[in-house]
Image (cartoon, rainbow, N blue to C red):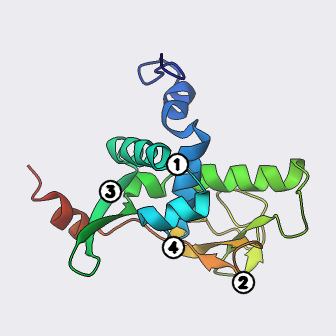
Amino acid sequence: MPLRSDWSQRTCSMARGLDILGDPWSVLVLREVFFGNGRFDAMKYRLAVADSVLTKRLAGLVEAGLLSKRAYDDGGRTRHEYVLTPSGEDTLPVLNAVAIWSEKHLRAPSDTAHMFVVHSGCGRRTSSADTCTSCGQRLTAANTSWHSLTRTPAPVQLATAASRATTAQQNGPAA
């Protein structure tokens, strides 16, 4: 029995979006890839998730076009890391909104259990998911950092989508 319904064909765009982004593990996988943590073992460690759960979420995010796989050599063995596609990079305002909403409305379990959205251009925290509330510039993965106090003492610049050339090399020539 499936854990939830398939909403991919619903007439409501929010329902269709939630079909992909409504699963907490999928959102946390995207968070890790935005943090530049796209290798399976690193994600598994950081998320403390079972192999089967992570494998299923990664496959779903690749199938949905939010992530792509890029081969790398691990000492003689070819493995894959996951990188954002342009569609995956477009989820940034959604993830920013979740973090900002959580900081505003949910009590943190400790003094270090915080994650802030920072506009790298002006270096200020923002309380908007898509625009810097200090300078007004639109937020993109290229100009946004996340400051997770449990990860690092300073904000971390986000990963951006793989270039189209790199993606084309991975997937073969376009038809």
Looking at the picture, tell me which residue is in the foreground, 105 or 36: 36
Identify the amino acid type marked 2. Ala
Residue at 57% x, 45% y is 25
Q: Secondary structure at mark 1?
A: loop
Residue matched to label 3: 68
**Mark 2 lies on residue:** 154
Instruction: Determine the CA span between mark 3 and mark 4.
Output: 18 Å
Q: Amino acid at mark 3?
A: Ser
Earlier residue among tags 3 and 1:
1
Visible residue check, residue 147: yes
- Specify few, some or many for label 1: CA neighbours under 10 Å numbering under 14, 14-19, or 20 or more: few
- Mark nearer the N terminus (3 vs 4): 3
Residue wearing tag 4: 142
Of 112 and 133, the residue lying toward us: 112
**Mark toward the start of the polypeptide (4 vs 2):** 4
- Find the distance from the CA under tag 3 to the CA under tag 1: 21 Å
Measured in 3D between alpha carbons, the distance from the residue under mark 3 to the one under mark 2, in whole angstroms, is 28 Å
Q: Secondary structure at mark 2?
A: loop
Q: Which residue is mark 1?
A: 50
Label 2 packing within 10 angstroms: few (<14), some (14-19), many (20+): few
* Residue 41: percent from left, percent from top: 45, 65
- Which is more foreground, mark 3 or mark 1? 1
Q: Nearer the viewer, mark 3 or mark 4?
A: 3
